[in-house]
Structure formats: structure tokens, C-alpha cells
Amino acid sequence: MLFLLSPAKSLDYESALPAVTASQPQFVAQSSALITTLKKKSPKQIAELMDLSEALAKLNVDRYKAWTPQFTDDNARPAVLAFNGDVYEGLDAKTLKPKELQWAQQHVAILSGLYGVLRPLDLMQAYRLEMGTSLKHGKSNNLYQFWGSQIADYLNTQLAAEKEPVIVNLASQEYFKAVDRKALQARVIECVFQDFKNGQYKIISFFAKRARGLMARFAIQHQLKTPAALQGFNLEGYAFAPDVSEPDMLVFRRRLAD
């Protein structure tokens, strides 16, 4: 099985890193092409394109200018240790053991507007480019057109050795839309996380994002190999809810203390 995650807007390039062996990203040529387009834009244009404040636009223009196709320990850090949003707080990769991180390297993929797909230990330079951005590049009007079937083709390659290839989608729909389902040769399982509030179970964005990271952590620590094994997820009070689940949509619920 291969677990898909979204990236995070928040980045951490300051905290101490655990001792890991980093890898090189897979789509450097494509990333370089996108950076070439981004470098031509002014802070005002970036602000309008991505709906950013003036300060954030300038920060990212500076990031594009500094970006280079050479990834080193000085200008980059492993993706799973660079992203710092709700999902990655749940995953808490810095506390995973080296063997667990190596398993994750083979079984977790992070979708990215700039990098296409990142393995957890792939080096990543700081950036901001959400997959839903309408960035025109060449004949492509947006990033979905730019990436086309490349992401699905990569995932197929990663799963080629499996008799029954399975994708567990823990990414947002914005990012999963970048996976060409017609080209993808794998079963897709969605995980839904609900919390009880105001008399009913519902998806609460903050908790759901954290739960996606928790599920990835659970999978990594237990080296899950089958869809059935996902049902054992029980971190932070969640439990599988079979009565509202479907074969390819697993629902996990919990009640928060009042």
C-alpha cells in the first residue's frame, strides 16, 4: 500500500534535525521549469495569483530567486521534516525511529504543486505553490494540466511489485485531483475522520487534518500491508465505524470530552 499526504503551507527550516539519510527529489526538471515561470513574476503578481499578503508574496518571490536544482543539506531539508502543518503535527516524523522512516520512504508519498511527488526523505527547498494555483506554463493553464499523468505514472511504478496495488488517500481533494485516475492502476481507499459535536458526527477540519497524520504514523509504526489492517487505527480516541463505512471509504469516529 502507498499512503498519500498533502503538503503544508507552514514550513520549518529552523529546528534541529534527527540523523537521517536524505534523498534527491524525483521531478527536479519539472520543478525547475515551474520555478523559471515563477521567477518572472513580481511580488504583486504572486500576491494576486496565490491570494497572499504583500509580505508573504515577497517572501516567496525571494524563495523562487534562491531556488536551485542542486539540493544540499545547506539549502534544503527532508520534506517530512520541513512541512509543519496540522497533518505533520499528527505524523510527528521527528520522533519516528530510523527504520520507521525508511519504511515510510517506500510507502508514503507527499503530493506537491512544485515537486509533483516527494518521498518523505527527499530534500526540499522552501516554497509556496498550492496545487490549485492557476499558474500558466507553456501550454498548461494550471498545475493539474502541467502534471497530467506524471504523478499517477510515478505511483504506478512505486506499486508495480504489489499483486493488489492500493492507494490510501490521506491527501485533500485539491491535491488528489492531481492524480490522473484514468492512468492510475490501483484501488483507492479514502479515510474519513469524524468527531461528535452538537449531537452529531461531523468532519472538523483541524481534527481531520491531524487525524490524517496520525493514520500515516499508525501505518508507518505498524507497517500496514492490507486495507483490513487500517481498521485497527485507534490513536487519540478514534475507532473504526463499520456501520457507516464502505469497502473503499473507511470512517473513523470519536467523541471528544465535554
Image (cartoon, rainbow, N blue to C red):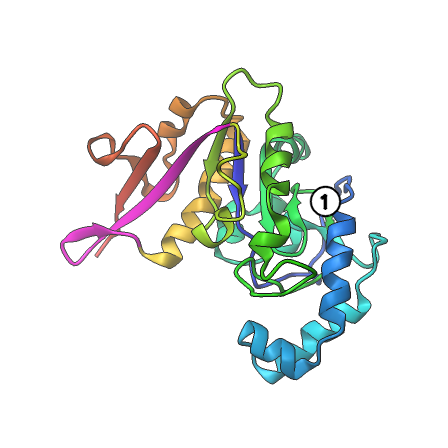
**Image point 37% across, 28% down: which residue?**
232
Residue 251 lies, with reference to residue 186, above or below; the image says below
Amino acid at pointer 1: Asp
State the SS at label 1.
loop
> Measured from the top left, where is residue 151 in percent x and y?
61, 41
Q: Residue at x 71, y 76 (%)?
A: 41
Identify which residue is drawn at 29% across, 47% down: 194
Verify whether residue 88 appears in magenta: no
Residue 24 on image: x %, y %: 78, 43
In front of the other: 212 or 163: 163
Q: Which residue is mark 1?
A: 122
Q: Position of residue 118 (x, y in %)?
A: 66, 45
Query: What are the residue bounds of the magenta stretch?
Result: 186-203
Q: What secondary structure do most residues of the magenta stretch adopt?
A: strand
Residue 234 position within the rendered picture, expressed as x and y whole percent measured from the top left: 36, 35
Q: Nearer the viewer, residue 62 or 210?
A: 62
10 Å neighbourhood of mark 1: few (<14), some, or many (≥20)?
many
Residue in front for this viewpoint, 128 or 216: 128
Position above or below: 88 against 66: above
